[in-house]
Amino acid sequence: MRVAMSIFISYSRVDQAWVDSLDDALRAAGIATWVDRRKIPIALPWFEEIRDAIEVSSCVLVCHSHGFESSAHCAAELSVAAQLGADTLHVSVGSDPLQAVPTVLSYLRGRSPELDLGLHLLGTARTWDRRGRPRRGLLRRRELREFRGADVPAGQRRQLAATFVARSKRRLRIRRTVTGAIALIVVFSAFFSYSLFRVSADDAATSGELAGRLQVQSQGLDLVDDDVYAALALTALLDDTEAALNAAVISAAHEARTPVDAFQVSGELIDSIIAVDQMVIVRTADGVAWQRPADATNERFASLAGETAPSGIDVTAEPLSADIRSGAIVVRRQDNTVRTITPAHSPIVARVSPDRRMVAAAALDRVLIYDIETGHHLISLRGAPEHVTDLAWSQDSTAVWGTGGSWAVKWIVRTGKVLIDDSTHAFRSVMPSPATDEIWLVDESGRLIAVDDDGVVRRELTLDIGDGLSGAMSDDGRFIVVVGQSAVAVVDLSTEGTEILDHQCAQSKPAIVVGEPIAYLSCLAGLVRLPLDNTGSAEVTPLPDDLKRQPIAYDPTSGTIVTSAFREPFYSLDDGELRPLGTDGELNCPTYWLNLVISANGVLHPSGEGTGRISCTVTGRPDGSGGLRWQNGAMERTTTHRSRASVFSTDGQMILTGFADGSIVVWPVENITPQVVYVELSGDVIDIAVDGDFVYAVSRSGMLVKFPTPSLPSNAALAIEAENRLALARELGLVEG
């Protein structure tokens, strides 16, 4: 068996453009290459991967230049090559890259087939070892015959290859025994990773391991930024044992949205693009127009549309327009600046969405989406085959088309069904009714609004409570408690009777007792116990000043109210007695909580200014003695903003958190990592509600969005999703292999 081995390319980063041309020329000639930007996984330390790659490559191709001579990293690679006895070939940076192809081909023809076979066996064994030595990764009978006589390099790797072959032979003889042994290995690996994830920072030994994990995380994030498809390919290979180590990278790979449609044109490079009705039209540099129906997702090539097609969008008639000034995006209404946004990458073109809520900016190989109202970065659209040179929005503002070279690609910007999109509203709460098919909303103006599943208003009640702050519904759907700036309203939906109570309370939701018509509110006077069915009068329990008008939640497992000051500690309130939960300072979050939610099994999750950061995304679990055992495991998100909205899924396995940048993030309760951005709204996500198979969310900028309840974001599920996205990219012709 003749094996096609890789050529390891050693180069200086300053020569990257020339090396890319060399890499393209070698691969076009059928020569496999190994380039660190494209090939390094994140599960192992960076330089260890370099060493392993050199060891299993046919040779090291040195791209010689002044930058190479002055690079300590390049010198280290040459040192490793010498230690391993690897062959080296030299090419000069600046010469014609095509000249290197015959040299490399000649070298490969002179290689010993047995040696390359041994290197291939070594690489296969290393992959098997890295994945936890799974049963399915072992050699089969035919493969064992092919590898017989392979010349494996000396050293520890030879022992690994021998173990790999021996284990494969044993699998053929004793299947049950091997299955049990490998299962134990997988369990041990999972336990090891989980232990690393939860280590105490006070332990010197584990602190070093934690530092190593964060280093690997940083390297992985660099990979995501460099090549989203390489990141997706890696994510598709990850398993549960790597959840803790690679959570941040998994999340970043999934946050980088990839194209869902693509087509090409024949002829010159595309100059501009426009989406008109149901047609996408592009114009090439020679003035020829091409078109393709927007929904013709199976067509990979556009057809001629004539030379009279529009060349772009006339922004002069738009209420909002955008242009680029000194690397910043300036959004204007006529001659007045509405928003100035400075992206991390200098954009070359910007387009305002038709709904006037977002602006898309093309910067290098990505499209950056920003919320105009807040200026927050919503998402990055990645995966274009070339640098993006022009943009066009779909007319419903749910998708963006981008062009570059001879390609046009499409990204989805939002997911879910938009029921209301009206900037004249500023919603504060959303409450799907369990008794009817209505969705009740609290408006900032103090109105209570009921809409159907299409967003059509059915009922509207104006409440004399000042500005609306929040609302909560009883679990039978009969009562709604609405907190206003100056008063509290209790609405009996069965009669639409309303009682106004003179209390000034917190902006956070009232805590309504499950199964009973009783609400608790954190108010200026203290904790107010409020019977909703007029069976008694309100009772007020005095609170310390630092707990007045603070977020509260009802714990169904203990029948108590849980509250907290801006930061720590947390308290349970039972019969007027405050009892601390957990240890003061244990969480070490530098900012403060704005919302508390508790699951049906008593798991507490606070959210606020620090949610999404290390040490600030936590869960508190009942410890069996009346206290809470805190679990902290969140990774730093690429963009972190205030969170005022959180909710548990119906089964209590997930937390959905809404952020001020419009994102809704899903967190597994058992792990809190990895996190996945599931949907993006325009404006600050102010409330979220789960109703069976669907989730409802509202923003301050007048949006009500409905989307299916997401599945649990386990590594297994994310691996499947990553693989599907990668397969779609291959189908679209955006990535090879």
Image (cartoon, helix red, strand yellow):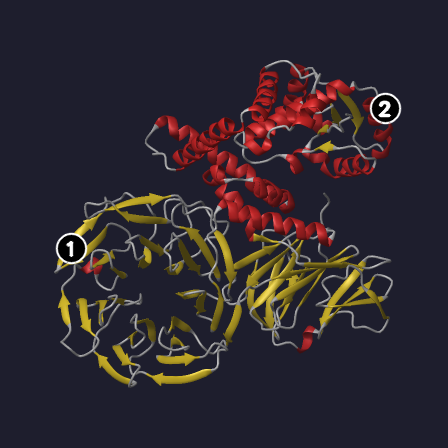
Per the image, the residue denoted by label 1 is: 578
At label 2, counting other C-alpha atoms closer than 10 Å, the crowd grade (few under 14, some 14-19, many 20 or more) is few
Tag 2–tag 1 contact (CB < 8 Å): no
In the rendered image, residue 663, in percent from the top left (x then y), is placed at: 48, 59
Quarter occupied by residue 475: bottom left
State whether residue 654 is above or below residue 334: above
Quarter occupied by residue 578: bottom left
> Which amino acid type is marked by label 2?
Ser
* Residue depth check, mark 2 versus mark 1: number of the one nearer the observer: 2
The total number of labels drawn is: 2
User: In which quadrant of the rendered image does the C terminus lie?
Assistant: top right
Q: In percent of the image, x 45 and y 39: which residue is there?
A: 244
At label 1, counting other C-alpha atoms closer than 10 Å, the crowd grade (few under 14, some 14-19, many 20 or more) is some
Identify the element where label 2 is drawn: helix
Observer able to see residue 376: no
Of residues 397 and 365, the one drawn nearer to the viewer in this rendering: 397
In the rendered image, residue 561, in percent from the top left (x then y), is placed at: 21, 60
State whether residue 570 is above or below residue 95: below
Q: Is residue 697 left or right of residue 541?
A: right
Observer able to see residue 227: yes
Identify the element where label 1 is drawn: strand
Q: Is residue 43 left or right of residue 114?
A: left
Quarter occupied by residue 575: bottom left
In the rendered image, residue 333, in percent from the top left (x then y), is placed at: 59, 74
> Which amino acid type is marked by label 1?
Leu
The first of marks 2 and 1 along the sequence is: 2
User: In which quadrant of the rendered image does the N terminus lie?
Assistant: top right
Give me the disc on residue 106.
2
Q: In percent of the image, x 60 and y 65: which residue is there?
A: 359
